Amino acid sequence: MKTLKDVKVGETATVKRLHGEGPVKRRIMDMGLTKGVEVYVRKVAPLGDPMELTVRNYELSVRKADAEMVEVE
């Protein structure tokens, strides 16, 4: 299983499935990370946290813990 955390800088991935329960999953969906959406990884901080993504034509910063809950292909 490949997660958003595994995607390298400059690559694009498609969200396949969201893991997590209740409010955590809801927060990820509210950020625009829903099934079928394309995500472009723009930058990753030196220690890997956070990641800067482009989702639905806007920039989004996501923590590594949240990125692990997003399964991509």
Image (spheres, rainbow, N blue to C red):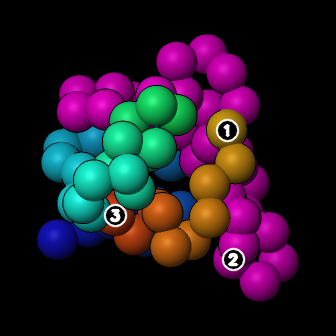
Q: How far apart are marks 2 and 1 (CA)?
A: 15 Å
Give amino acid for label 2.
Gly
- The CA span between labels 1 and 3 is 16 Å
Query: Residue 24: x and y, percent?
Result: 40, 56
**Residue behind mark 1:** 60
SS for tag 2? loop
Residue located farthest toward the top when viewing the structure as drawn:
57
Q: Mark 3 points at which residue?
A: 69
Using the image, tell me which numbered label, if any, was put on residue 48.
Answer: 2
Q: Relative to residue 48, is residue 68 drawn left or right?
A: left
- Residue 28, placed above or below residue 38: below
Residue reaching furthest to the right: 46
- x, y percent for residue 8: 53, 62
Tell me if 13 is positioned left or right of 32 in this view: left
Which residue: 69% across, 77% down?
48
| Disc on res. 13 | none
Q: Give me the C-alpha separation between circle 3 and circle 2.
A: 16 Å
Magenta range: 32-59
What amino acid type should be assigned to the residue bearing mark 1?
A: Leu
Which residue is located at x 71 percent, y 64 percent? 50
Q: Residue furthest bottom?
A: 47
Q: Mark 3: which secondary structure? A: loop
Viewer can see residue 71: no
